[in-house]
Amino acid sequence: MEQRQSPLEALVTPAALPQRGFWRGRTVFITGHTGFKGSWLSLWLHAMGAKLVGFSKDIPTDPSLFQSFRLHELMTDLRGDVTDLSALTSAIAAAKPDIVLHLAAQSLVRLSYATPVDTYATNVMGTVNVLEAARQTPGVKLALMVTSDKCYENREWIWAYRETDPMGGFDPYSNSKGCAELVASAYARSFASDPNGLRIVSARAGNVIGGGDWALDRLVPDLMRGLISGAPLNIRSPHSVRPWQHVLEPLSGYLVLSERAYEDASLASQGWNFGPDSDSEKTVATIANRICDQWPAKDGWVDVSDPAQVHEAHLLKLDSAKARIHLGWKPRWSLDDALDASVAFYREHAKGGDLRALGLQQIAAYTA
C-alpha cells in the first residue's frame, strides 16, 4: 500500500514537483491552451516530453503568450468551442489522450457582468461537454477541471476557504465556477465510480501573476501595458487583499495532482486548493507599488475606483493544507520571486527578446 506523508512531514520535506518520466510520451489534450495559464502549461508539458493536442476557440489577447512561445510549433493546435459538444467529442476521440486538462473559460469577473449568458455557457456547459466527451472516449484515464478560488460562497471573512466549504459566487463568473465544481462532482459520483475507469478531479487557485498575461481588467497586465507604453497607471480597489502567486505554482499543483490521481483512485472525485502562503496575501496597492519600484513610473499609479462599479471580492484566500498533506505540494516561490520573474518577462517582451527561451529558463529555475 502507498505510504502517505504525515502532516509534519509535508511541512518539512521539499515540495513535490511534476515528474518528467510520467509525462514523457504521454498524450495530453488541453482546452484553453492559447490562454495565459494554458500557454505556460503547454510549454512545461512539452519540455517534459508530452505529446500535446490543444483545443481553443481563439487566441484571446494581442499580444499573445501562445504566439510569443511559438507553441503552434510544439503541439497540435486546434480551433474549436467547448460549447460545441460534437466538435469537442470528435477532437478528443481523434487525439486519443490519456489525460484531459480543461482550462478553457471566460475568466474575467467584470466581463461576466456584460456577458452573463456566454459566461455560463462557456464555464458551465463547457465543463459538462468536456466531461461528457472524456467519458465517451475510450482510453481517457483522467480529466482535470480547472476552476477558481472564486467558486466558494465568499463571506468576506478572514479565514481561508477549505475544499469542504460550500460553492457559491456573487457575480456570474464566480457563480459559474461554483456551478462547474458541482458539475464535476456530479459527474465524478455518477460516472467515475469504476476505479479502473475515468477519474475526475478539480483544481482551484488564487490570483495568478506571471509574464505574458495580457488580459484586460487584471492588475499586472494593466500596469505593464501602462509602463511599457507610458500611459497612465489606473487601478481599482487598491485596498482589496488578494492571495498572489506566480502562475507556475498552481500549474505545478495541477500536474502533481494529475500524476497522483492517475495512479491512485482515492485521490480522484474531489476538489483541491492550490493557494500561496499567507505572506503572499497583499493589497492591490502593495503589488502596484512593488512593480512600480522595479519599473519606475513617472507619476505612479492612480486609483480610478468608482463607487458605482460592479461588485468584486475584497478578501478571499485558500487553505491548501489538503494538497500539502496528501500530495506533498506547497509553494516554492515567495511573492518577491514571483514579482521579479514577472517583471523580467515583461522587460524581455519590451525589448523583443526570445520569450520561449526565457519561459523555459523560468520553469527550470522554479523546478531547480
Image (spheres, rainbow, N blue to C red):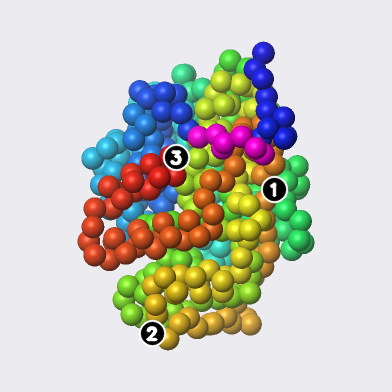
Q: Is residue 37 left or right of residue 258?
A: left
Q: CA distance from mark 2 to mark 1?
A: 38 Å
| Element marked by disc 3 | helix
Q: Is residue 184 visible?
A: no
Which label belongs to residue 298?
Answer: 2
Of labels 2 and 1, earlier in sequence is: 2
SS type, badge 1: loop
Q: Say if residue 279 shows up in the picture.
A: yes
| Residue under numbered circle 1 | 319
Residue at left offset 37%, top offset 25%: 24
Which quarter of the rendered picture does the C terminus lie within? top left
Give me the C-alpha separation between circle 1 and circle 3: 23 Å
> Which numbered disc flags the more N-terminal residue, 2 or 3?
2
247 and 156: which one is in front? 247
Q: Which residues are magenta?
A: 11-17
Amino acid type of the residue tagged 3 in the rendering:
Thr
Relative depth, front residue between 121 and 362: 362
Q: Position of residue 34 (x, y in %)?
A: 36, 48
Q: Is residue 55 above or below residue 60?
A: above
Q: Residue at x 42, y 70 (%)?
A: 294
Q: Residue furthest top?
A: 1
Which structural element holds mark 2? loop
**What amino acid type should be assigned to the residue bearing mark 1?**
Asp
